[in-house]
Amino acid sequence: MSLSTDVIRLVVGMLIGMILPRIPLLFFTRFLNMEQGLPPHPDSVPIGIPLVQRLLLMRRIHFMCWITATLPLALGLWILQNSPDPFAFGMVAGVSWFAISRIVPEDIEQGFGILSMSVIKSVNNLREPETDCCEQAEYYWEVRSIRCKQCRFVALEHPRPDLGRIRSDGRLKGSLRVLLMDGRSIFPPSNSSVVSEGSKLLSKIAEEE
């Protein structure tokens, strides 16, 4: 085979290895009717039982992605045992990239995973907060954070992840965005993200030198 053919087979294998694990995230959220209980995208979501139930469901779907990831991984490793095939190597590399993106936390304080239990508990606690920010407190999960609809108080500074709603930009573009972002928000989680903490550490080292 020529070098260009091997490169194409490698790239195709990587794409399959990255897309297959995310099939549950696309199928259960884009091609099944999950619109009950939540306002349409991109409207803000009120803090309540429907939102907490959807977060728990999305957490299960994210875990299902690990199960579907075993198929291309096992197939790729099995092929590589017999021959150094670029397609199989690409699948293994794609699944490995998926695993790394899931294991490395975006927010150190919020725990591991795209939807950690600590985030879900924080959202659930806002259903009955210990103290209200104003007399008519109504908390909504906006794109960047959870705010009070009345006084605009920030109750939780955490970007809203994908909640399985059909996106306003259509099924095709919405599915592509979910694949690229893996259900995460396009906005950074907070100032305590791994990237920001690393940048601060490098800046501090540079100043000391």
Image: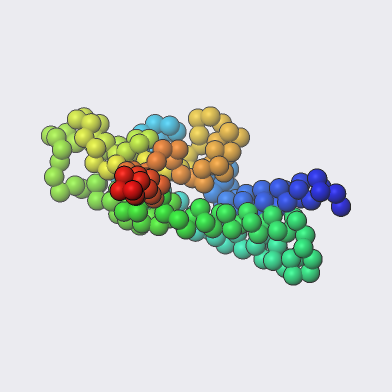
Q: Where is residue 149 in the image (x, y as percent from the top left)?
A: 25, 31
Residue 50 visible? The answer is: no
Nearest the viewer among 164 and 180 is 180
| Residue 82, quarter of picture | bottom right
Tell me the residue at 77%/63% (across/down). Answer: 84
Residue 126 drawn above or below residue 100: above
What residue appears at the point 56 percent right and 54 percent down from the top-left corner? 98
Q: Closest to the observer: 132 or 196?
A: 196
Establish if 19 lies above or below 186: below
Q: What is the x, y in percent for residue 64? A: 53, 58
10 or 52: which is nearer to us?
10
Residue at the extreme front: 209
Looking at the picture, how far across and down is residue 56, in whole percent?
40, 54
Q: Is residue 11 visible?
A: yes
Q: Residue at x 52, y 56 (%)?
A: 100
Q: Quadrant of residue 132?
A: top left
Query: Residue at (51%, 37%) from the top-left corner?
Result: 166
Taking the image as shown, residue 91 lies to the left or right of residue 150, namely right
Q: In this view, does 165 lie to the left or right of 142?
A: right
Residue 19 rendering spot, x and y as whole percentages = 62, 49
